[in-house]
Amino acid sequence: MFTMRPATEADTPAVTSMITARCGWMEQQGLESWRENIDDLAGQSGSGFMWVLEFEGSIVGCTTVMTQAPPKDWTPEEADEPALYLFTTVTDPAYQEHKPGTLIALWAVDRAARQGRTWVRRGCFFPELVKYYETQGYSLVKEQNRSAGHLYLLARRAERLDLEALGMETRTTV
């Protein structure tokens, strides 16, 4: 059974290892990685906004969940709609057969619905990720040029899902 739970500062070493593994995989595929930002990303473990996905006691994924829209990404009208925003979702490539990224995305869709929110939104800078997120039911809403690159913004309507049937549970405490 996979478990989503809030990350803690004590998770930082395991999150660092998991992100490092993903960076290695990305580099082997010829993709840009987050290697230079590993410490910053893993350091979010103690922020109160990161959630981790565990499997048999190992952290196999993480995502940062916010309730406020990034100011430049969404219009004021869109930002007024109740939504969860996912950032820096990273998974361990050793578990890819279990589709941990999809599990995290579906967990967020269910969590948003349980909180009475309408949307789950996320952004990325790579067209390959857009295609991947579309397989999870997200739709490309708009694109923006940024100093960091071309930003793709996606959304999916929140809905209640049977997480247990997906082999998942949520724990709100460590």
Image: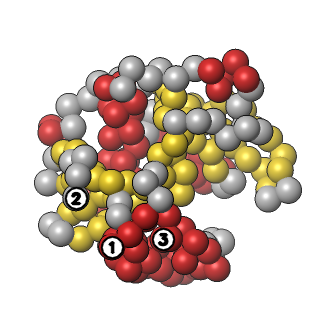
Report how far apart the C-alphas of labels 3 and 1 lie in the structure.
11 Å
Residue 10 is marked as 1
Whether tag 2 and tag 3 are in contact, CB under 8 A, the answer is: no
Where the N terminus falls, by quadrant?
bottom left
Q: Earlier in the sequence, mark 3 or mark 1?
A: 1
Answer above or below: position of 73 versus 46: above
Left/right of residue 109 with respect to residue 71 in the rendered view: left
Circle 3 or circle 1, nearest the eye: 1
- Where is 23 relative to 168, above or below? below
Mark 3 burial class by Cα count in 10 Å: few <14, some 14-19, many 20+? many
Q: Residue at horizontal 24%, vertical 71%?
A: 58
Secondary element under disc 3, as helix, strand or loop, is helix
Q: Amino acid at mark 2?
A: Val
Q: Position of residue 151 (x, y in %)?
A: 73, 47
Q: Amino acid at mark 1?
A: Ala
Residue annotated with mark 3: 42
Identify residue for label 2: 174
Q: Is residue 10 visible?
A: yes
Q: Quadrant of the C terminus?
A: bottom left
Q: Could you tell which of marks 2 and 3 lies nearer the N-terminus?
A: 3
Given residues 15 and 8, the one toward you in this image is 8
Q: Amino acid at mark 3?
A: Ala
How many labels were placed on the picture? 3
Element marked by disc 2: loop
Closer to the camera: disc 2 or disc 3?
Answer: 2
Of the two numbered discs 1 and 2 on the same chain, state the one appearing first in sequence: 1
Mark 1–mark 2 Cα distance, whole angstroms, equals 10 Å
Q: Which mark is residue 113?
A: none
Asked whether the beta carbons under mark 3 and mark 1 sit within 8 Å of each other, the answer is no
Task: List x then y, in percent, for residue 13.
Answer: 38, 80
Residue at position x 39%, y 20% from top? 116
- Residue 119 position, x and y percent, is 50, 26
